[in-house]
Amino acid sequence: MKTYSSLPGRDEESRIIPCPLCGETDFRSPWECGDFRFVRCSRCGCRYQNPQILSGHALSRYDEAYCAYERENEESFLNLMKLGLRDAGFDEWENEFRLKGPVLDVGCATGALIGWLSSRGWEADGLEICPSSAAIARSRGCTVYEVPLEEADIPDGRYSLIHASHVIEHVNDPDVFVRSIYRLLKPGGRFICVTPNTASLQAFLRGGAWRSAIADHLVLFSGGLLRDFISQRGFAVLAGKTWGGAPAGTLPAPLKRIADRGAKRFNLGDVVLVSAEKKLF
């Protein structure tokens, strides 16, 4: 039911933190998930792990087991990312933005997406903190940075498009993450962010048993919260879409199709995509 996640290690350090989005120290409605828990910020509604693992320990989780998972599911994940790009209107503006500059895929894993984008004429770079996955991505002939985004030696304003699918929920400091993306985009450049949606029907029904309430997810957003968060950091939000009404295998195929269509129509899907543009000042 849940996505892949490493288990908290005995030597990992964690601490009680204020809300990583707004700084509020009051939280409530915990989701108890065994060795960890998610709380809900009483001010902004963000769901986040508290206590939360320290950044250096979180990075060490992306090891050979993670790489094997990414390799095994590479084709399926690529197809999902392509569907997400289509939902973001990529087909309509791709040619214009490809001519303006390169693309960066943050959390590129084994590089399937940057390989696909390269085949379409993009100059495609990747960023991946798992050494084994980064090596596979680099073998596709693309530049791959093997550090957290804020530490990457990349000139300001290099990219016309930055894509981050299922990444922002893994970082301790989403504010630094989004501000780094803003800095690296050209004025008018696009940011596409995909992450689990805490306003989904499945999250409401399952709480701490929800498939995205896992140890490696540190901060979780609703679609509305993600749109507000991005827009407050210099972006003009262009679109927000959700999908995923029921996990595979939980319903007969005809009922799953109905659930998926309903979730997408009413913005109750398990996954949310927000596309945004760096404002021209």
Image (spheres, rainbow, N blue to C red):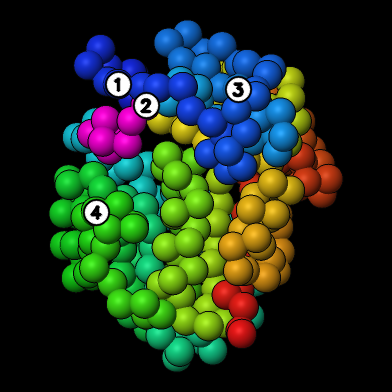
Query: What residue do we see at 55% from left, 52% from top?
Result: 194
Q: Which mark is residue 13?
A: 1
- Among the two numbered marks 4 and 1 on one chain, the one whose residue lies closer to the N terminus: 1
Q: Nearer the viewer, residue 261 or 158?
A: 158
Question: Where is mark 3, residue-wise?
Answer: 39
Label pair 4/1, CB-CB below 8 angstroms: no
Does residue 54 lie above or below 268 as drawn?
above
Mark 1, other Cα within 10 Å: few <14 / some 14–19 / many ≥20: some
Task: Tell me, yes or no, whether the highlighted magenta stretch contains residue 59.
Answer: yes
Reply above or below: 242 against 39.
below
Q: Residue 198's quadrant in the figure?
A: top right
Residue picked out by circle 4: 147
Mark 4 Cα shell of 10 Å, populated few (<14), some (14-19), many (≥20): some
- In percent of width and height, residue 34 lies at 47, 8
Q: Residue at x 27, y 58 (%)?
A: 151
Q: Which residues are magenta?
A: 53-60
Residue 176 at what x, y percent from top left?
44, 54
Residue type, numbered disc 1 = Glu
Residue drawn at x 57%, y 82% is: 188
**Mark 3 crowd level (few <14, some 14–19, many ≥20, 10 Å Cα):** many
- Residue under numbered circle 2: 53
| Labels 2 & 1 near each other (Cβ < 8 A) | yes
Label 4 and label 1: CA atoms lie apart by: 21 Å
Q: Is residue 97 above or below residue 174?
A: below
